[in-house]
Image (cartoon, helix red, strand yellow):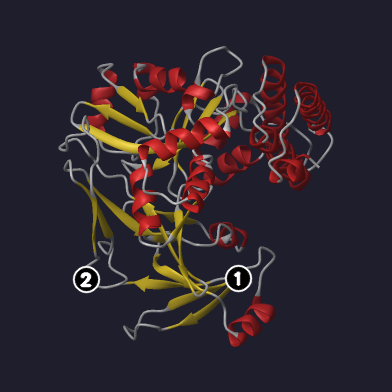
Amino acid sequence: MLTSLASKSTALTTAEADDVRTASKNLVSTALSLADTVVETDLKNIAAQATSILVAQASLGIAADTTLIDSVTVASQQLGASLITSLLTNDDGVAPTTEEITESLTNDTTLFESVLDVSLPVPPSIIPTVAERTDLVTIAYPTLSAAAVTRSLAATAKIVNPQNITLSSGVTALSFLDTYLTTPAVVESSLLGGIGSRRSVAALLAGEAEIVVDAVTGAITISVPGETYAGMVLAVRTVPASVPNGLRLRTDGRFTLVSDGTAMDIAATAFSVGGFIELAETAGFGFTQNDNASFSLDLGSDQTFVGAFAYDNLADADIDSACGAISVTNPEGLLNSASYAFGINCANGVTQKVVPFAAESNFLPSLRAAGMTATADRSTGVISVNGVELLKPGFFTAAPTTDELTYHAANTDSLGIAMQILDINDDGVDDYKVISATTVQIMYGVE
């Protein structure tokens, strides 16, 4: 009901908004009461439904009060703890110790991601009105059509502004991130191999970090001596205290920062998100920001472009000035080479890469469900499967043909994905046609 109400953009009275807040609190409390009584699948379903309630409330422009934030925090911690206990309790019914839980969460990426799957996002305590957001977009990007402004608002609504999230501790998510980046004990415990190098960690240990939040989009720029990255926050969650602190690389290429029971998902994005949307829309390509920080462009005729920004170091550019005019550099080399990427270039010297990305959000979970481990590298677009086979997605998708739909019907898995093995580019390496009910995308084998 709340989701339906939110989709109609209905203006609510103060009393109606209070009713929605009350309903959200009651439903989150219900999720908490069920957390100890169900199995993994049910926990994920409960978490998904509770999340949809919180998203609907935010879409209605109703900010969370401290009571709801506290309720979400407690429920999220309990959902995660129940999942951990359920998965790690042995056949004799002996629950895991705290040390065993920490070790498992440190070494088992699947378990770690499963805990995040049942964790609830902290709802925003500040929500600008649609009119306020529209004014910001139209002033900053006056060439956008009314339809493009609407798509821009939908896209930027999926970017979490860390200034607008208040944790149960009373600090904002922006303050949490700043503390994380400048706390030696936290950084030293991070699992390295993430953004940048040990040089960046040394800079963080020196307590030298700056975070700039874009007022129009909510995107962030993180700078430390010698390194600067453009990113977006995807979610801020509360997790059980047993989840170890550190920086974790996720299977879809995003990063999750964990510190003392708070987890923040971050991924790379355009230095000028609004400018990039304006560029796409002016070229006639409808822009969509996906939940996993990838983006899609509508090319018409049921074709789309799907890409993600790489973790490019922007330290050598003049990031204190506006991006300015944006130009695009076409890829060079082979479709399945690691370096095959588009270049996005700002007039101020910022240069970034856009790499291809899996169009179907269920693609990586489908591989996991089949017993395979797969990790996407957002700096190249290459997907590593079982640590041996490498795949490079194509940038473009199309609607499935009749033959492809027939193949899909006969071979689809429980997540709606069918994979057909072919050698599409005649290089002697297996390629895969990833077919869903609505899209087809090629995954090129990499030698």
Q: Position of residue 429 (x, y in %)?
A: 36, 79
Q: Quadrant of residue 365?
A: bottom right
Three-letter amino acid code at the position of disc 1: Thr
For residue 438, the mark is 1
Q: Which corner quadrant holds the C terminus?
A: bottom left
Q: Which corner quadrant holds the N terminus?
A: top right
Q: Which residue is mark 2?
A: 333
Specify few, some or many for label 2: CA neighbours under 10 Å numbering under 14, 14-19, or 20 or more. Answer: few
Dot in front, 2 or 1: 1
Q: Quadrant of residue 340?
A: bottom left
In the rendered image, the vertical position of residue 325 relative to residue 319, given as above or below: below
Q: CA distance from mark 2 to mark 1?
A: 29 Å
Query: In the rendered structure, which disc, 2 or 1, sits on the residue that comes first in sequence?
Result: 2
Which residue is pictured at 34% across the width and 25% down the height? 211
Q: Is residue 441 left or right of residue 328?
A: right
The residue at the far top in this view is 170
Tell me the element at label 1: loop
Which residue is pictured at 32% across the width and 70% down the height? 336
Q: Position of residue 367 (x, y in %)?
A: 56, 62
Q: Position of residue 253 (x, y in %)?
A: 43, 48
Q: Is residue 1 left or right of residue 322?
A: right
The answer, for residue 104, to whether it is visible in the render is: yes
